[in-house]
Image (cartoon, rainbow, N blue to C red):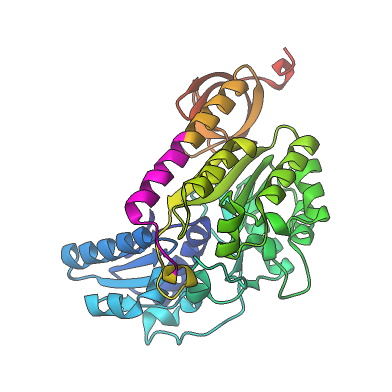
Amino acid sequence: MSASLAGPVEVVNFGCRLNIAEGEGVRAAARAAGVRDTIIFNSCAVTDEAVRQARQAVRRALRERPGAEVVVTGCAAELERETFAAMGARVVSNDAKGLAQSYGGAAAEAGVRPYAPALSGADHARAFLGVQTGCSHSCTFCATVLARGTARSASVDAVVASARTALDRGQREIILTGVDLASYGDDSGTTLAALVEALLALPVERLRLSSLDPDRIDDALFVLLTQEARVMPHVHLSLQAGDDMVLTRMKRRHRRADAVALIERLKAARPEVAIGADLIAGFPTEDDAMFANSLALIDDCDIVFGHIFPYSPRAGTPAARMPQVGRTIARERAAILREANARRRQDWLGTQVGHTASMLVERDGVSGHAENFAAVALTAPAAPGTIIDVRLSARDGDRMIATQIEAKDIAA
């Protein structure tokens, strides 16, 4: 969860990078409407816990800020509109949250609208650029299609214009994000690879992609991920499980062997690439052997950045009607996966000691990320927003300690 204060309007973003990017449009729309003393919760619904946190935050705001208008938008608002309205909050649909009339007068009617790029604010060293929303797949565990509808993409020209805005204000790394990023362009006859190529025609220094479906990495995108230096060597994959029966019941479009083979190809073509993955523990019908396959996937695929969470049933999804393994077991299995992933990450970070890297310095002047997304802490401050060369001298928990070096010293 992140909060953005904007004078009389406070925007609180929950969940994914896309929500962070879209939160800037929410703030701009509320400003354009001229509203005052308003708290807008841009909610998430990826898990039951995410929805619970949104409900809790809304209740707290209504209790502690009785004179303020409380607005709820985002995915949880779509799925629990009546719940939030009964609390006393104003509910704005996902598709209308970027419209001024949603805040200044009667809320805009819900409905599918063309998707415009969503660009995060200028107050971060990196720019999150939402280029796609919705999903046209039918994974049995996911409520996203209920909350955001089918996949829609912003135009290449509009995305390029938003990227120029980020570059003009000094942001040197752009992160492309979306609900189903790899499906970008399916609705308009283009591809994610074509979008990346268009963005690389700009003077962007670092381009990073958020979560990708492994079955949608075509040859053109593979080449960009492995041969283009400005595309960061960090690939995050929506794997979800490491057992074929679980993947089938999830209605995923890849199998375990596909994931392993893809990562072997990525590593062979670009050995420095770091792998991240989304994984769900305790999916309905998952037995000990199935879970063991998912656990082994962390080592088999060299996953160093795991986004791991226990399965929680989402109302209206097919998985919610399947035989459940129980929340306690799901949480226990998620903890085991996180521990295994933490060990893998620690081992990987240990291999980085003594290497040089390029890092983008964050707002505090002492932290940032290397090209491979390793977290870095500087021994002495550097100018926020700059990209500097560093020597990685030690591992400290989940981050690397580094010292800035001059370009002429890199080979020393």
Question: x, y percentage for residue 390?
Answer: 62, 23
For the point 47% across and 74% down, which residue is it? 94
What quarter of the picture does the C terminus occupy?
top right
Left-right relation of 93 to 409: left
Between 92 and 24, the one nearer to me in the picture: 92
Residue beneath the point at 63% across and 58% down: 165
Q: Above or below — where is 34 with respect to 19? A: below
Task: Say if residue 358 shows up in the picture.
Answer: yes
Taking the spot 63% from the left edge, 19% from the top edge, the residue there is 405
Q: Which of the 4 quarters of the picture holds residue 75?
A: bottom left
Magenta-colored stretch includes residue 323: yes
User: Taken as a whole, is the magenta stretch helix, strand or loop?
Assistant: helix
Horizontal side of 376 relative to 132 (left or right) equals: left
**Residue 409 location (% of width, % of height):** 70, 15
Q: Quadrant of the N terminus?
A: bottom left
Compared to residue 248, the image places residue 89 above or below, namely below
**What residue span does the magenta drawing correspond to?**
322-339
- The spot of residue 40 in percent (x, y) is 35, 67
Identified at 59% across, 43% down, the residue is: 276
Would you say 273 lies left or right of 53 here?
A: right
Q: Is residue 351 above or below residue 123?
A: above
Relative depth, front residue between 363 and 73: 73
Closer to the camera in the image, 60 or 329:
329
On the image, the x and y values in percent for residue 152 come to 63, 74
* Count of numbered circles on the image: 0
> Is residue 231 shown to the viewer in this render?
no
Does residue 326 sit above or below 82 in this rendering?
A: above
Verify whether residue 361 appears in magenta.
Answer: no
Residue 302 figure quarter = top right
Between 335 and 73, the one lying in front of the other is 335
